[in-house]
Amino acid sequence: MAIVSGRFPIRASLAAGLALLVMTACTYSGGIDQPGVQKISWFSYLNGDDIRRACVPGSVPHWRLVYNGQYEQQLRGYELVGDGHGGATYSARVQTPASLTNFTLNNPLEPWAWKTNELLLSPPEVQGFETALQQSGAYGPTPKGLRLHSRNFYWILIACRDGVVHYNAWLHPSERWDRIVFDDWLLRFDESGVPFREPRFVDPAERLSDRITRGDDDSSVNFDIQIGDNGLVGHLSF
C-alpha cells in the first residue's frame, strides 16, 4: 500500500506505526461491498491503491469519490470507469447501520450489505461530471496536512486521468466544502434509495463524549486519517 508514516504525537506513534504495518498487508483490490473486505482494506480503498496500480499512460480514466457521513452512520462510494470511448460505467454503493429486520436465511449477511446500483453513462454525461469536479476544485492543490476524523463529514477523491493520479479531500465545514457541486451530479444517478445524510458540525468534545458514554474504543470505527501531497500519509486509531 502506498502510504507512509505521518507525523503523530509521540504517545501514539507506536500504535500508528503498527497500524501502518498491518495496512501494508491489506491492499484493496476490489469488492468493498463484500463482507470482510471493508474492515481489512478501508484505508487502502481510501488511498485508491488499486487505481494507482492501474494508472499508466493509455489507461482508461477512473474516478472514485467516497462520502464519510460519520463512519458508523453512512458511507457512500461512487466509481466511474471509462469505457475507452468517452462514456463510463457508474457505480453507487451506500452503507448504513445494520438492521436485523433485513436478515434472511437465504442471505444471512444482508443486514451488513451495501446498497448498490450500476449504469452506463454517455460521453456528454461524463463530461458533465468532469465539469462538476473542476468547479469543485477537484484538480487543484491537495489540502496537505488535513486531518479527517471518522465521525466527521467529508469527501475524498481519487482519480486517474491521462495516466496521472489526482487526490483531494473536502472537510465540512470549510470554504472548500462550499464549492462542492459534484455531489448533486452523483446523486442524480444514485438509485440506491438511501437518502443522503446531510453534514453538520461535529464538535471534538462531542466525539470524546460519545466515546466515554458508549465506551466505544474500537479503532476500526474511531480513527483519524491524514492527507499528504497526493494521498494518505497515515492513520491514527483512538
Image: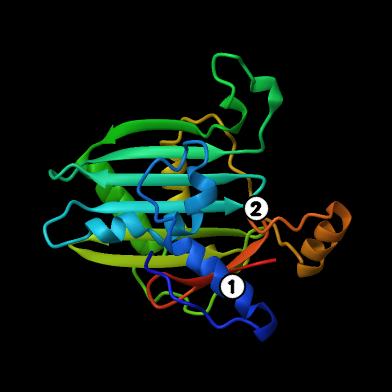
- Specify whether 193 is left or right of 237: left
Label 1: element kind:
helix
Label 2: how many residues lie within 10 Å, few (<14), some (14-19) or many (20+)?
some
Is residue 160 among the parts visible in the rendering? yes
Image vertical order of residue 182 relative to residue 149, above or below: above
Residue at left offset 59%, top offset 33%: 112
Label 2: element kind:
loop
Label 1: how many residues lie within 10 Å, few (<14), some (14-19) or many (20+)?
many
Which residue is under mark 2?
Answer: 70
Residue at left offset 30%, top offset 49%: 128
Tags 2 and 1 in contact by the CB under 8 Å rule? no
- Specify whether 210 is left or right of 190: right
Q: In front here: 39 or 227? A: 39
Three-letter code, disc 1: Ala
Q: Which of the marked residues, 2 or 1, is nearer the chain's N terminus?
A: 1
Quadrant hosting residue 46:
bottom left
Which residue is under mark 1?
Answer: 16
Percent across and percent down for residue 29 are: 35, 48
Farthest residue in the right direction? 213
Percent across and percent down for residue 156 are: 47, 60
